[in-house]
Image: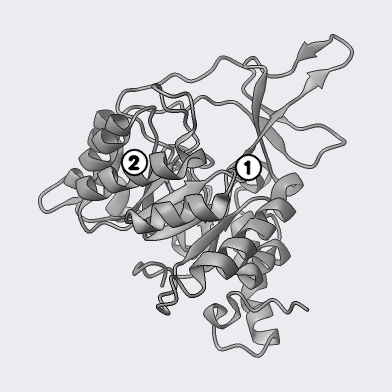
């Protein structure tokens, strides 16, 4: 159970890494009933083509990971609701919709429209279990990423919370957010149901022979094994400083750990650090069936640890 959402297991597929919504299932690539959940591509109010190619590359032989600058390519919320959402109920896994934008109005529009379509008589038929806010987008008025400023994020989350009603609201934080504990606290106080930690790390790759930037956008986001230990530390920080005993009231605030999960040991690290679930992204590009091995490995690990379920091991790292 994650923020009131039942998950078959703690392994989910991260936003933007498995198509817009149900392509993995439709193509027979992966039986989604065997993973805990899936997060859609980040949806914006209007359709976006994204950045020109090259916009996704292997980070290179010396770096274990991937660098990308997709540019939030997506069909736009109306096309998403019309063409994709009706199929969500047949996905046999927990469906979470990611939302992005460049103003508070953008987020409210996209999230509110999805919540409306998910309601009684809507296209989603109640299949969407949560909205995940991708707050790594710069505000068009300030140029500052929503996830970098506690006050700005508080305003954003509060506005979206009002627009989506009781639908659980997750906030996906950047791993390079200054004062991440204060920013996360602002999100929770404004109505976030869970925290997703984290996103890609800003990066750049240069072809030293041609002296050209390898990405058409010049800079992009680094993901994969290279960022894993950074994300593990942030999960532990937020678990111990904020989520474990939120405001001293004994209210557990769930964390979803994201960053470099390609083996079950990576997922186990996140769980011990304080994550209730994990998301896999970059690993899917190398092997879209890798989540099944992670699920199987976690099951064996839980038994070997003498635990009745994975929840007993959340935050159970031994320190000192």
Residue drawn 50% across the image and 68% down it: 243
Q: Quadrant of residue 85?
A: top left
Left or right: residue 192 versus residue 246 is: left
Q: Is residue 107 above or below residue 162?
A: above
Q: Is residue 317 above or below residue 129?
A: below
| Location of the N terminus (image quadrant) | bottom left
Residue drawn 53% across the image and 79% down it: 311
Q: Is residue 215 above or below residue 262?
A: above
- The reply to whether dot 1 and dot 2 touch (C-beta < 8 Å) is no
Image mark for residue 156: 2
Q: Earlier in the sequence, mark 1 or mark 2?
A: 2
| Location of the C terminus (image quadrant) | bottom right
Q: Residues within 10 Å of mark 1 (few under 14, many from 20)?
A: some
The picture places residue 241, in percent across and down from the top left corner, at 57, 66
Asked if residue 271 can be seen in this view, the reply is: yes
The picture places residue 158, in percent across and down from the top left corner, at 29, 48
Judging depth in this view, the residue of 213 and 91 nearest the camera is 213
Residue drawn 47% across the image and 31% down it: 137
Left or right: residue 315 versus residue 93 is: right
The picture places residue 305, in percent across and down from the top left corner, at 69, 86
The picture places residue 36, in percent across and down from the top left corner, at 47, 63
Image mark for residue 176: 1
Q: CA distance from mark 1 to mark 2?
A: 19 Å
Asked if residue 35 can be seen in this view, the reply is: no
Residue drawn 31% across the image and 54% down it: 90
Q: Residues within 10 Å of mark 2 (few under 14, many from 20)?
A: many
Image mark for residue 99: none
Left or right: residue 43 versus residue 77 is: right
Q: Secondary structure at mark 2?
A: helix
Q: Is residue 148 above or below residue 259?
A: above
Q: Secondary structure at mark 1?
A: loop
């Amino acid at each position: 159970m994650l923020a009131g959402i039942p998950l078959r297991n703690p392994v989910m597929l991260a936003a933007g890494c498995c198509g817009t919504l149900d392509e993995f299932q439709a193509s027979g690539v992966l039986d989604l009933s065997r993973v805990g959940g899936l997060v859609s591509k980040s949806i914006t109010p209007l359709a976006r083509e994204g950045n020109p190619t090259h916009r996704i590359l292997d980070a290179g032989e010396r770096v274990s990971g991937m660098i990308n600058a997709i540019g939030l390519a997506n069909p736009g919320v109306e096309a998403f609701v019309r063409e994709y959402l009706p199929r969500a109920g047949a996905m046999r896994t927990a469906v979470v919709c990611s939302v992005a934008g460049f103003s508070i109005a953008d987020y409210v529009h996209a999230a509110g429209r999805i919540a409306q379509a998910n309601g009684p008589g809507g296209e989603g038929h109640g299949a969407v279990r949560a909205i995940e806010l991708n707050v790594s987008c710069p505000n068009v008025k300030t140029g500052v990423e929503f996830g970098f400023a506690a006050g700005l994020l508080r305003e954003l989350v509060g506005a979206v919370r009002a627009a989506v009603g009781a639908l659980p609201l997750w906030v996906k934080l950047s791993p390079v957010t200054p004062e991440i504990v204060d920013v996360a606290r602002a999100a929770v106080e404004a109505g976030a149901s869970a925290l997703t930690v984290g996103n890609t790390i800003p990066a750049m790759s240069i072809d030293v022979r041609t002296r050209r930037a390898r990405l058409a956008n010049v800079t992009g986001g680094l993901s994969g094994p290279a960022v894993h230990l950074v994300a593990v530390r942030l999960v532990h920080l937020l678990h111990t400083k904020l989520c474990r005993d939120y405001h001293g009231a004994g209210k557990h605030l769930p964390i979803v750990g994201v960053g470099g999960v390609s083996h079950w040991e990576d997922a186990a690290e996140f769980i011990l650090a304080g994550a209730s679930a994990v998301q896999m992204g970059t690993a899917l590009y190398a092997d879209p069936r890798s989540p099944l091995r992670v699920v199987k490995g976690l099951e064996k690990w839980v038994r070997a640890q003498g635990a009745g379920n994975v929840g007993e091991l959340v935050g159970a790292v031994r320190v000192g």
